[in-house]
């Protein structure tokens, strides 16, 4: 395929683009196995100095955005605080407001929940972050499935999975209405009721940029109708192509162009000076992400009992699991894994016996890993350039494994390789998050 003449079509529903740029964000979850927070080189994961250091590093690397994950309850394992995670995270909007004062260009994206917030209140707080950051705010729209979070709000499970997306749709429509007009906005449905008017002036980008994780059918539909940026687990090239084609077909049904929505798959990255070094580092990362205590805790969810007396490097537990289906108290178990646990454990026993696997080796085999790119900066730059030029993706939302060293490697080694290929900016072309992402300009807010 040449890079001259007319742009041929691609399987993704968008034309080949020889000048496409890689857009990058970092998703700082704060909890979860991807962060090796116990390593001696890791910075303190709840200190404001760490967040300032990271966000300034990413701004030096000309990243589009810094994403903050947020949980509305501390994670648990079988009713106890899960102390293998970093426990407790500051409110994302509050934290990003502090980071806005420490930076000038990088976008600041807050994860905020549509199930347990109120539209007018959240729209006001997000608009405040957008105004105070001079047009650099984004909203990562999440719905939260688990009932244990809802217990903090006297709601419990409240809404089934499908209805959460229906509330999210109505919630986002109400927020957009508040951001687009100074006139009072009214909504009266079974899921959203309000009468309110905007109390915060519009920022230079008009409103916060809307991000949404769209893997399920409901998530993809919400993204196609409402989002500006979508991220998913589909970062392997073939899957990314299929996902992009599906999403752009949905966009067309709603009268939206391919460039009205940026696709940033979530991905992890391990760099090495040689391919062999990168592979060795990737093994080290995986071994530390799924260490012995984490492997035991993972099985405890399925066995439904205390397994702390078992050796993670020994055989699977010799006791039978409880009959009860999985307790999603940690909020991390996929919905399709919450039933059928006894059959799943039976298959695990067969696999462990066939391959001679210990507890930790089994967990390493069956626990899904984050989508991972492993290689030299040069090889990764070639691969990512292919992604964006064929429009399989517009960039990536990265999950770091060590803070700050894994991000420093990206900024100092990978970014220059991308710049050499002409697939990454050499300076910010604008000052707002919407400009960084090359999204369509919004119309001005209507007067009352």
Image (tube, rainbow, N blue to C red):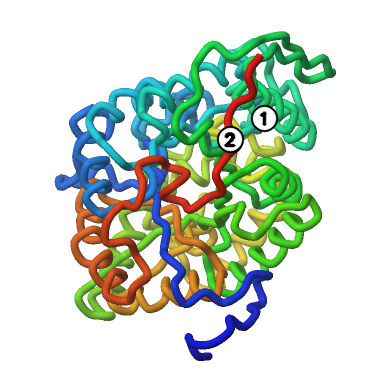
Tag on residue 141? 2
Crowd class of label 2 (few under 14; some 14 to 19; many from 20; radius 10 Å): many
Q: Judging from the image, what secondary structure is the residue with disc 1 in?
A: helix
Q: Residue at horizontal 19%, vertical 75%?
A: 273
Q: CA distance from mark 1 to mark 2?
A: 9 Å
Q: Residue at horizontal 50%, vertical 24%?
A: 202
* Residue at numbered disc 1: 172
Of 422 and 239, which appears nearest the observer?
Answer: 422
Does any portion of residue 131 appear in the rendered image?
A: yes
Give residue 332's position: percent from left, percent from top: 55, 40
**340 left or right of 143?**
right
Image quarter for residue 302? top right
Q: How many marks?
A: 2
Give residue 369's position: percent from left, percent from top: 48, 59
Does any portion of residue 291 appear in the rendered image?
A: no
The mark that comes first in sequence, 1 or 2, is: 2
Q: Residue furthest left?
A: 40
Of 240 and 6, which appears nearest the observer?
Answer: 6
Q: Residue at horizontal 76%, vertical 26%?
A: 159
Q: Indicate whether 78 appears above or below 348.
A: above
Q: Judging from the image, what secondary structure is the residue with disc 2 in?
A: strand
């Amino acid at each position: 395929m040449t890079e001259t003449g007319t742009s041929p079509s691609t399987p993704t529903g968008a034309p080949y683009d020889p000048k496409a740029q890689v857009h990058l964000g970092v998703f700082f979850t704060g909890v979860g196995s991807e962060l090796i927070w116990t390593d001696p080189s890791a910075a303190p994961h709840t200190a404001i100095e760490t967040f300032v250091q990271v966000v300034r590093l990413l701004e030096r690397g000309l990243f589009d955005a810094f994403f903050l994950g947020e949980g509305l309850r501390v994670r648990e394992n079988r009713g106890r605080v899960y102390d293998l995670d970093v426990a407790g995270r500051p409110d994302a909007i509050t934290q990003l407001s502090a980071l806005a004062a420490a930076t000038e260009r990088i976008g600041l994206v807050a994860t905020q929940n549509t199930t347990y917030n109120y539209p007018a209140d959240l729209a006001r707080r997000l608009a405040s972050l957008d105004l105070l950051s001079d047009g650099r705010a984004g909203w990562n729209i999440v719905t939260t499935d688990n009932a244990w979070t809802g217990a903090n709000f006297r709601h419990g499970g409240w809404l089934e999975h499908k209805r959460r997306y229906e509330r999210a749709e109505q919630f986002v429509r109400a927020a957009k209405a508040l951001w687009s007009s100074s006139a009072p906005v009214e909504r009266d449905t079974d899921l959203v009721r309000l009468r309110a008017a905007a109390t915060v002036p519009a920022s230079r980008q008009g409103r916060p940029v809307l991000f949404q994780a769209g893997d399920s059918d409901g998530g993809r539909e919400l993204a196609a109708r409402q989002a500006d940026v979508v991220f998913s687990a589909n970062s392997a090239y073939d899957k990314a192509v299929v996902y992009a084609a599906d999403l752009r077909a949905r966009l067309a049904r709603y009268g939206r162009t391919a460039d009205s929505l940026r696709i940033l798959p979530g991905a992890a990255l391990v760099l090495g000076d040689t391919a062999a070094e990168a592979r060795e580092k990737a093994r080290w990362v995986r071994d530390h992400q799924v260490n012995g205590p984490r492997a035991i805790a993972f099985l405890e969810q399925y066995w439904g009992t205390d397994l702390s007396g078992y050796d993670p490097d020994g055989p699977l537990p010799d006791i039978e699991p409880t009959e009860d289906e999985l307790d999603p108290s940690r909020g991390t178990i996929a919905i399709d894994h919450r039933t059928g646990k006894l059959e799943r454990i039976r298959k695990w026993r067969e696999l462990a016996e066939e391959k001679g696997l210990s507890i930790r080796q089994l967990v390493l085999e069956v626990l899904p890993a984050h989508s991972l790119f492993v290689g030299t900066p040069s090889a990764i730059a070639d691969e990512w350039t292919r992604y964006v030029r064929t429009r399989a993706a517009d960039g990536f939302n990265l999950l770091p494994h060590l803070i700050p060293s894994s991000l420093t490697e990206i900024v100092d080694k990978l970014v220059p390789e991308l710049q050499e290929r002409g697939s990454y900016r050499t300076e910010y072309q604008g000052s707002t998050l919407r400009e960084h992402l090359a999204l369509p300009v919004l119309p001005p807010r209507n007067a009352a």
